[in-house]
Image (spheres, coloured by chain):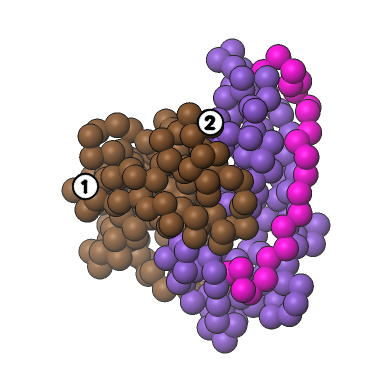
Chain colours: A purple, B brown
Amino acid sequence: MTPAFADIEVGYELPSQQFPITRADLVRYCGASGDFNIIHWNERIATSVGLPNVIAHGMFTMAEAVRVVTDWLGDPGALVDYGCRFTRPVVVADDDNGALLTVTAKVTEKRDDNTALITISASCDDATVLGKAQAIVRLA
Amino acid sequence: MALNQEFVGRSFPPSPVYQVGREKIREFATAIGDSNPVFHDPAAAAALGYADIIAPPTFAIIVSLKAVTGVAHDPELGLDYSRVVHGDQRFVYTRPICAGDELVVTATIESARTVAGNDMLSARADVATTAGEHVVTTYSTIVARAAEEAGA
C-alpha cells in the first residue's frame, strides 16, 4: 500500500536499486516504444555522429529511474508529476555487461496537500546521467 | 539555423485516436523490466481500484512523442532532425493511462530557441480521452545539436 504521509520525513531515503542495461534491452525498448533512432542500436552510425558508442534512449533511463519511486509507492498511480533533464548519455558497450545504472532517491519536501517531492539521482560509472530528476507523489 | 518563430504558440489538430491495448502495456512494462503486477495482471490492478491494468509512468511518451515529432519534422520549422537528442521530459498526471483508454493528443509548441548553436524546441502535449477527460500532459524539449559539436 502507498506509504502514509505522516510516516515519512524529509530526508527519508527510498530503497535504492541498480539496473543493468544491455544492447538486448535497447533493442527490446526500440520495439516496445517505437523509437528506432539508429544511435540506440547501431555502433557504426553512433560513432559517426560523435558518440562514444551506442547510447541508451533517454526515455529508457527515465523509465528505469522512476521504478525506485513506483516500487516504493506500490500503486504507481500515486505518482502525479515526474520530470528530468538528459544531461549525459548512458553508453552501452557491446559486451555481456553493458552499462549499470544506479538510482537513489529521497524525500526532499513535504507539502500541505499530502504530496511529497522526491529527488532522484541516477548515475553510471559514478557520473550523473539525469539532471533535476524529480517526482511528486501523493501519499496516503 | 534559427527556428521558425511562427511555430511558437501554435497548436496542432488533435491526433488520431490511440487505443491503449493491454498487451502493448505488458510489452512496454516487460521491455523496461518492470514486473509490478499492476502493469500485467488485471486482478492486481482491480485490487488498487483500476478498471484494467495501468501503464508505467513513461508509457505516455509513446502517445505524446508521436504528435511532437510530427511537428518537429515539418520542413518549415527548420529543425535538423538528424542531429536531434532528447533534452528534457516531464509528465504531469491526472491519472495513470489504463488499458482500454481511447486517447487523443493535442500538441502545442511552447518555445523555439537557439542556445550556443543548439536549436531547442519545447512542446506540450495534452493527452485526454475521447470523452474529454484529462489523463496526462507531457512537456518535451528536443535539441538539434550544433553541427560542429560532437557528443550528446
- Depth-wise, is mark 1 or mark 2 nearer the camera? 2
> Tag count in the figure?
2
**Residue identified by numbered label 2:** B48
Q: Is residue A7 magenta?
A: yes
Badge 2 local density, few (<14 within 10 Å), some, or many (20+)?
A: some
| Percent position of residue A138, x then y | 57, 24
x 46%, y 53%: residue: B25
- Please state if A128 lies on the left or on the right of B3 as rendered: right
Secondary structure at badge 1 equals: loop
Q: In whole angstroms, how far apart are the C-alphas of marks 1 and 2?
A: 31 Å
Q: Position of residue A2 (x, y in %)?
A: 64, 27
Q: Is residue A29 above or below residue A39?
A: above
Is A18 situated left or right of B123 in this image? right
Q: Determine crowd level at label 1: few under 14, some 14-19, many 20+ residues with C-alpha closer than 10 A.
A: some
Say if A130 sits above or below A110 in the image. below
Q: Is residue A31 above or below residue A95?
A: above
Against A20, is B68 above or below? above
Residue bounds of the magenta highlight = A5-26
**Residue A114, quarter of picture:** top right
State the image coordinates of residue B47 (x, y, percent, origin top left): 53, 32
**Quarter of the image where the N terminus of chain B is located:** bottom left
Relative placement, left or right, of A124 versus B49 is: right
Residue in view at x 28 percent, y 45 percent: B102
Q: Earlier in the sequence, mark 1 or mark 2?
A: 1
In the image, A90 versus A51, the foreground residue is A90
Kind of residue at badge 1? Pro
- Residue B56 visible in rendering: no
Q: Amino acid at mark 2?
A: Leu
- What is the residue that sits farthest to the left in this orientation? B13
Please name the residue that numbered disc 1 is placed on. B14
Question: Which secondary structure lies at badge 2?
Answer: loop
Q: Residue furthest front?
A: B43
